[in-house]
Amino acid sequence: MVHTPVHASWTNQIEIFFSIVQRKVVSPNDFTDLSEVRDRLRAFEDRYNSTAQPFQWRFTTSDLDDLLARLDRHTLDQQEESSARLSA
C-alpha cells in the first residue's frame, strides 16, 4: 500500500516524466527483445538524471482564476442563448 497525500501534485510530475519516457525512449516500438528495452531505458535514465532541470510552471493561480471566470461566463452565455431559443 502506498500513502498518497491529499495534495497529490507529485502525480502530475510523475505523469510528465512517463510522458517524456514514452516519447523519447519507447516510441517507436521497434525493440527486438526486452533486454533492448532495459538498455535503452537505463541509458535514458543516466542521460536524463545528468541533465534534468526542475519544471518551470508558467500557469499561475491568477491565470487559473481568469480561465475559470471566462469558462463561467461562457457557460452562462450558452445557457442564456439556449433558454432564449426555447422560449422563442
Image (tube, helix red, strand yellow):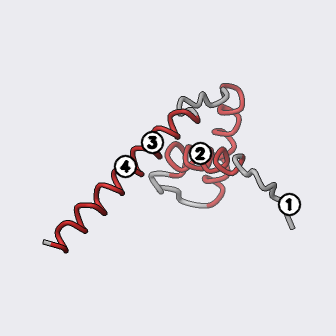
Residue type at mark 3 is Leu
**Circle 3: is it few (<14), some (14-19), or many (20+) Cα within 10 Å?**
few
Residue 67 picture location, percent across and down: 45, 42
Can you tell which mark lies on residue 67?
3
Precedes in sequence: disc 1 or disc 3: 1
Residue 65 picture location, percent across and down: 52, 40
Precedes in sequence: disc 4 or disc 3: 3
Mark 1 sits on what residue?
A: 3
Is label 1 in contact with label 4 (beta carbons under 8 Å)? no
Residue type at mark 1 is His
Residue depth check, mark 2 versus mark 4: number of the one nearer the observer: 4
**In the image, what residue occupies the spot 52% across and 42% down?**
24
63 or 8: nearer the eye?
Answer: 63
Residue depth check, mark 1 versus mark 4: number of the one nearer the observer: 4
Precedes in sequence: disc 2 or disc 4: 2
Quarter of the image for the C terminus: give it: bottom left
**In the image, what residue occupies the spot 69% across and 51% down?**
11
Can you tell which mark lies on residue 16?
2
Is label 1 in contact with label 3 (beta carbons under 8 Å)? no
Residue type at mark 4 is Arg
Can you tell which mark lies on residue 73?
4
Residue depth check, mark 4 versus mark 3: number of the one nearer the observer: 4
Quarter of the image for the N terminus: give it: bottom right
